[in-house]
Image (cartoon, helix red, strand yellow):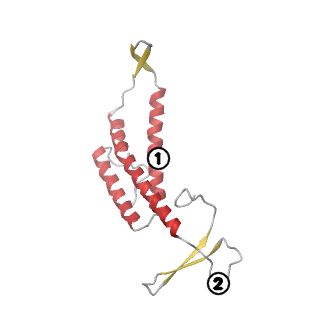
Amino acid sequence: MKKLQPDWFTHNWLDAEYQKYVVMAYLQAVQQNFTEYKLCPDLPELRSHYDAGIRFARGKGTLNAAFPKRVSRVSGPPPRIEYKSEVTDPDFMTEVDAIMEFALPRFQALLTEGHQRWADIAQSLTLAPVGLLPLRPEEGYLLIHATSQAETQVYYFSMRLYSEQEPGGD
């Protein structure tokens, strides 16, 4: 699986087991790319899927906290009141919760690995101008020559401000 839909946790069948296999196939493809140090576009996309899952889980928790609760019991020498929610999750929300509980830790582990690989690349990468400097140093060409190949790859670049904490720019 190359790409995961933005609404991956509710896409197609709302079945926890099916979605687990979808997530595992996606993570396997991302892991393969990370092993080959191909971080983009997988790392920013993985970050967005993880953030969407976290937002969903927090939003659901906030929504459940807003519903009224009933007193279930009073206990202890210092009086303590325990409340129980009157709202029960329907079956589909239970399935989505199971999907999130499965996927989010795996997303986080792979994100950590991706960030580590990003840091390794950033630490070992050095760029230096060779020859004439352009009039506008934020634009230019990057020449990459692999000694095992007879070709040189030429890339045009246009730099913009970005945060080094966010792999993939933006």
Query: In the image, is residue 130 above or below residue 137?
Result: below
Which residue is rendered at x = 46% and y = 21% of the image? 68
Which residue is rendered at x = 49% and y = 27% of the image? 66
Amino acid type at mark 1: Ala
Residue that mark 1 sits on: 52
Is residue 45 rendered to the left or right of residue 11?
right
Find residue 62 and report its horizontal and vertical position in percent. Answer: 48, 32
Find residue 94 and report its horizontal and vertical position in percent. Answer: 34, 36
Amino acid type at mark 2: Gly
Closer to us: 42 or 122 = 122
Which residue is rendered at x = 48% and y = 52% of the image? 48
Find residue 43 and report its horizontal and vertical position in percent. Answer: 46, 59
Residue that mark 2 sits on: 131
Q: Which is more N-terminal, label 1 or label 2?
A: 1
Which residue is rendered at x = 43% and y = 67% of the image? 37
Query: In the image, is residue 168 above or below residue 129?
Result: above
Closer to us: 64 or 90 = 64
Query: In the image, is residue 14 above or below residue 115?
Result: above
Is residue 154 rendered to the left or right of residue 158?
left
Q: Nearer the viewer, mark 2 or mark 1?
A: 2
